[in-house]
Image (cartoon, rainbow, N blue to C red):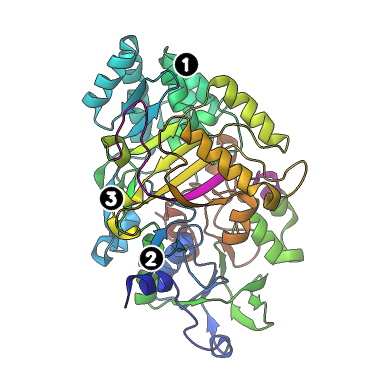
Amino acid sequence: MSSASAIKNQGRVGLPAPVRELASRRWDAIVVGAGHNGLTCAAYLARAGKSVLVLESRDRIGGACTLAEPWPGVKMSPCAYLAGLLHPLIIEELQLVDRGLQWTPAANGLFVPFEDGSSVQLHDDDLLCEEEIARLSPDDVPGWRAMSKLMARVRDAIRPPDRNDMWIGEPPTRDEVAERVGRDRDALGLLFEWSMADFVERYLTDERLQIALLGQGVIGTNASPFDPGTAYIRFHHSCGRMFGTTGTWGYVKGGMGTISFLLCDAAREAGAIVAAGVPVSRIVPGEGVILECGQRIRSGVVVSNSDGRTTVRLLDKAADPRWRAQVESIPTEGCTLKVNVWLRELPNFSARPGTLQPHHFGQINTPLTKHEWRTGYETARSGRLPGRLWTELYFQSVHDADVAPTGTHTMSMFTQYVPYQFQEGTWADHREAAKAVALESLGRFCTNIPRDVIDAEALGPPDIEERVGLSGGHIFQGECLPQFMWSNRLRARTPMPGVYLCGAATHPGGSVIAINGRNAAMAILGKGA
């Protein structure tokens, strides 16, 4: 099979049997949606001896964690682009490494160039990181150490590397979380109270260092870094434990969709049936589902991998009113622009010249000033496109040459803020302008962008909504701010008989974690952690 054919066919599982045949039996569980959490849930249920049918509306599985070929020979993860929170239990129990999971940490950390020509490389290695900070702002080394120690202390309390990890099982209350961290005031500030600006200003004095980190408090979040609770977003994304590392993100060989495809392998090996191109039009509690073609498939348990609002729509009048109100109280309006880029060469940053430098192997943020953060957020909220965007960049091709034709590179740009809906016109009217602003926001720090862009595609919130099925285009199935987390997040078990949720709308929240799917399976099976 040619490389192009392999890309084209990856994740396309097809229809394993005619729909009429699938509907001729009663299933122990039907999972609606073959995203990574739905496939995880299916794998655990099937391993427990349950007959499980997974129904995916699209022709390729994976949801937001999948693969695409936007240009010939270029393999990209259109939405999810990096792994750092995939839960160790999932990796271990579903034997993902034995199945082929290869992960390369982006150990060079976070590179940030500044408009004055200076820059900083915040390495994962403490010594190297402190050397960089000392060059930029010597007085901030003690504050950086204190900030890092707080993050580590809270991570070890909340997410110890054992079954006491609070992401496993039923979501804890705020009081239980507070008890776990010893009611330490700084820990509670980080988890529940501080804005990201509060956090960085508490520990760092150099404004360049402060703005270097502000974007880490609003990733995928429709809030300003000056809004209370955004420091938690930084914690959420910094408490991973993949392969024994802490807080490190990295690249999956073959792209992020590989995770979903391996989870699908685990589910099918255990006996689950996965059918693609089979859209569900209605969930009937206690009875099963009705497909768009009108066919009924029977099951006493239906697990929705969809977000809460999509699940409400599928339930229609069967949705419990109080539960529906909770679902609708969680904001789901996305604010991110994902730009997938094909490059002739990697960005050449004026602050650290070169097109294959250590910073290209980590992550890169192009910062905004505090004023730009404030005005950009307000501009997007008013339905207009800001003149400058914060960007986060990753380069899969420097770790995995097979994802692009020889001599070219891929770049994932994750940018904020953009409107979900414009004051005037539609996303079709503004998409090219949004893409240009994103590239210009990067290009002001580089000598070769946008010159060396071969092609690029931009996905605004409505594009993500249409392509992936995420209501509002919100990448986490709803905000992950503290007021919508822990016991305030949607639970796997719903008030409707036999209806469960397993996606990012449930505890512990968004990103490619997969423990959400395991938690749902354990709830269905009546088991603990």
Quadrant showing the N terminus = bottom left
Quadrant showing the C terminus = bottom left
Pointers 1 and 2 in contact (C-beta within 8 Å) = no
Residue density around tag 1, few if under 14, some if 14–19, many if 20 or more, within 10 Å:
some
Tell me which secondary structure the magenta stretch mostly adopts.
loop
Please give left or right for residue 124 compared with residue 277 in the image: left
Q: Measuring 49% from the left and 70% from the top, which residue is drawn there?
A: 60
Outermost residue to the top: 139
The amino acid marked with disc number 1 is: Glu
Residue 181: x %, y % from top left: 41, 29
Which residue does the numbered mark 1 point to in the structure image?
A: 201
Residue density around tag 3, few if under 14, some if 14–19, many if 20 or more, within 10 Å:
some
The amino acid marked with disc number 3 is: His
Pointers 1 and 3 in contact (C-beta within 8 Å) = no
Res 394 label: none
The amino acid marked with disc number 2 is: Leu
Nearer the viewer's eye, disc 2 or disc 3?
Answer: 3
Separation of marks 1 and 3 at Cα, in angstroms: 35 Å
Residue density around tag 2, few if under 14, some if 14–19, many if 20 or more, within 10 Å:
many
Q: Nearer the viewer, residue 47 or 86?
A: 86
Q: Is residue 51 visible?
A: yes
Which residue does the numbered mark 3 point to in the structure image?
A: 399
Q: Secondary structure at mark 1?
A: helix
Q: Is residue 179 above or below residue 285?
A: above
Which residue does the numbered mark 2 point to in the structure image?
A: 263
